[in-house]
Image (cartoon, grey):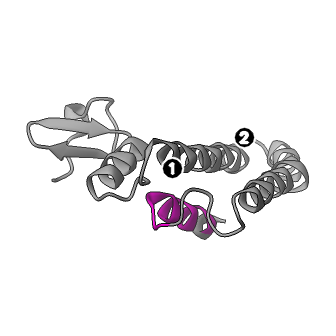
Amino acid sequence: MQVSPRLTDTPFGSLPVLNYGDDEVAQSMTIARFLAKKAKLAGKDDLEQAQADMIVDYISDLTTDVIKVIMAKTPEEKNQLGETFFKTTLPNFLKTSEALLKKRGGKHFAGSDVSFLLTNKFLFTRQL
């Protein structure tokens, strides 16, 4: 496995790209899910995989909202987006995430084993 050296050689003109055998896999979350399945960290059955994917995608949605704040074109827009994020978006994310976690027993969002979901949650919280 290695990263393609030139962006023009990648499927979408961007990184990351995983070279796997004679083929390529692009997009970070696709690569993460693929490798999680190969390492048996994607969940023990289809339901656990879907539950993990659901939370990872929810975190991805929140990350998109963070990027909108960071990439705002004016200080006024940044302040407005930041205020909405911290007063509405983030509290709603935490509230709904906590409710789901409690519904599933309070310890795991998906299953009871280590999964790629844990890595994704760690990386996201580290960005905050």
In the rendered structure, the answer to whether residue 49 lies left or right of residue 66 reads: left
Q: Is residue 51 magenta?
A: no
**Could you give the CA–CA distance between mark 1 and mark 2, rounded to whole angstroms?**
40 Å
Placement of 43 over or under 105, stated as above or below: above
Indicate the amino acid at tag 1: Glu
Comparing labels 1 and 2, the label whose residue is closer to the camera = 1
Image quarter (top left, top right, bottom left or bottom right) of the C terminus:
bottom right
Q: Magenta part of the protein: which range?
A: 113-125
Q: Label 2 neighbourhood size at 10 Å, few (<14), some (14-19), many (20+)?
A: few
Q: What count of labels does the image hold?
A: 2
Q: Nearer the viewer, residue 47 or 95?
A: 47
Placement of 76 over or under 117, stated as above or below: above
| Helix, strand or loop at mark 1 | helix
Q: Label 1 neighbourhood size at 10 Å, few (<14), some (14-19), many (20+)?
A: some
Q: Nearer the viewer, residue 24 or 114?
A: 114
Question: Residue 19, image x and y in percent?
Answer: 17, 44
In the rendered structure, the answer to whether residue 42 lies left or right of residue 85 reads: left
Residue located 44% across and 54% down the image: 43
| Helix, strand or loop at mark 2 | loop
Indicate the amino acid at tag 2: Lys
In the rendered structure, the answer to whether residue 4 lies left or right of residue 72 reads: left
Q: Is residue 117 magenta?
A: yes
Residue under numbered circle 2: 73
Q: Main secondary structure of the magenta part?
A: helix
Residue 98: quadrant of the picture: bottom right
Question: Residue 73, image x and y in percent?
Answer: 72, 40
Q: Nearer the viewer, residue 99 or 81?
A: 99
Can you tell which mark lies on residue 48? Answer: 1
Residue located 84% across and 56% down the image: 95
Question: Residue 127, image x and y in percent?
Answer: 60, 65
Q: Nearer the viewer, residue 33 or 103?
A: 103
Can you tell which mark lies on residue 110? Answer: none
